[in-house]
Image (cartoon, rainbow, N blue to C red):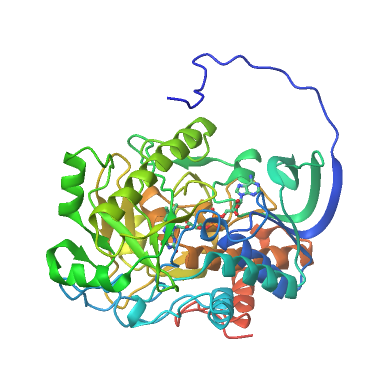
Amino acid sequence: MPVLHRPPQPTVIELAPRLAELAAETDVLVVGGGPAGIGAALGAAAAGSDVVVVERYGFLGGNATAALVMPLMSFHTQTLKAEKEGAATLFPTDHGRGQAVVAGVLKTLLERLVKSGGAIAPSLKTGYTVPFDPEIFKWVAMDLLDEAGVRFLFHSFASQAIVKKRKIEGVVFETKSGPIVIRARVVLDCTGDGDVAARAGARFEIGRPEDRLVQPMTLMFRMVEFERHAFEAYVKDHPDQWKGVHGLWDLIRRASAAGELELPREDMLLFATPHEREISVNSTRVNRVLGTDVWDLSYAEWQSRRQMRQIATFLQRHVPGFEKSYVAQSGVNVGVRESRRIVGDYQLNVDDILNARKFPDVIARSTYPVDIHNPEGTGTLLRRLPPGESYDIPMRCLLPRGIEGLLLAGRCISGTHEALSSYRVMPVSMATGQAAGVCASIAAKSGKLPREISTSQVQAELVRQGANLGASLPVKKA
Ligand SMILES: Cc1cc2nc3c(=O)[nH]c(=O)nc-3n(C[C@H](O)[C@H](O)[C@H](O)COP(=O)(O)OP(=O)(O)OC[C@H]3O[C@@H](n4cnc5c(N)ncnc54)[C@H](O)[C@@H]3O)c2cc1C
């Protein structure tokens, strides 16, 4: 295997102390420009704060753009199962006619994406998901931040937190210009992996309690010159081989037996995009790897790119509609579903989700099921909420225990392995981002710590910004 391995007994080298340039001082510093970071920046700016977003890549969007993770999953309540057996479709069909439980900055982004021709609005036809174009996502997100007066710095990787007496005061970034520091009244960790919180000394957990295994990584890719009608005709003729967005079980079994495919997946997972002749492929799978380990990440890139080549060839050879298709683009990096879960004042758990629990300190809501891609091999566990239901995410999940001046948003908020599999999706990450941004702004403006801010103040501002916190909310619109 060509991948460099971790030495069995690493030698530790001492580095020379160094100086860094102070690049900026701001009210709110958002680290990571993915769905959570975009939500956070827009929420904090709309609440009246000076905001800086810092991102390691040269564009915004996080997994939505860098990892080509498409579409935005449904944020609507589910009705009773409405799936038609063998429906010839490339959209999930079992989300039914539900109510949206996320609004706010997500709604703003969606309206702008749809207006720009970059997304299909959620409807029964799309199974209430949002297929989008990642390139249009990139510029729409940048426009929104620009219009909100948010400043951003790209190509900067957060490597260290500056912490005094358990309060974070700034972050060190590695850049082409050398190390720089940005100081802030409040810092938001929107890195997905909880990099800033971990560097600041926050406690975190990883994976399942029994073996610390996390969900697999997946390299996503787009194929073009796809003939949708030919594919749909094939699945119509083979109704037992396709359900909503996944299937082709028999063809995969045969190709695997012939040695053409070596996949820890029993099916293909394919999603429609806004473009008629394009398909998004979510079917590579690398198990037993961790997104915060450089050796694992390198191995996963190598494995998943080998799998991508096999899958593309398999589709071209064996699946009607793919004969002339080809891979137009793969993710900048393999997609990481799960890594650090920072321990906060409350840990959301699977019972909260499946029992559609409501909290007085709700700051975001979700309807997405528990959706665990097997950390060890084939198969995916799906457990849905009761029809018509949603669950609340409390403010306490955004407050890391033991560290002040820091808020969490997106994938790294406080919850269990099972709970993460639900709240990790992009619409919900944007919603927790917006809430963290609002709380940070109120704290920065009042000279208080985020933990000292009353949740009703955060809720009132979120509602003023158009967020959907549900009917049971104990605050009135400001
Ligand atoms: C294969 C796969 C399929 C998925 N399918 C779907 C789907 O169909 N629909 C859906 O809604 N969700 C899906 N998800 C889940 C979803 O993509 C993520 O959980 C979501 O993007 C989390 O948002 P986030 O902003 O917390 O993190 P991310 O999207 O990961 O964004 C984090 C950002 O921070 C930056 N960053 C990270 N570390 C640093 C650092 N140290 N310094 C500076 N910047 C940093 C990153 O470059 C990135 O821009 C999928 C995930 C994967 C991996």
Displayed quadrant of residue 388: bottom left
Query: Left or right of 463: which side holds 444?
Result: right
Question: 100 and 87: which one is in front?
Answer: 87
**What residue is rendered at 53% in x and 75% in y?**
118
Relative to residue 439, is residue 476 depicted above or below? below
Instruction: Tell me the quarter of the image containing the C terminus.
Output: bottom right
Can residue 228 be seen at all in this image of the molecule?
yes
Judged from this view, the residue extending furthest toward the bottom is 477
The location of residue 326, given as percent across then percent down, is 40, 56
Q: Position of residue 215 (x, y in %)?
A: 37, 45
The residue under the point 30% across, 75% down is: 78
Provide residue 457's location: percent of width, then percent of height: 64, 73
Q: Residue at x 59, y 74 (%)?
A: 105
Q: Nearer the viewer, residue 251 or 298?
A: 251
Give coordinates of residue 284: x percent, y percent. 36, 47
State the quadrant of the N terminus.
Answer: top left
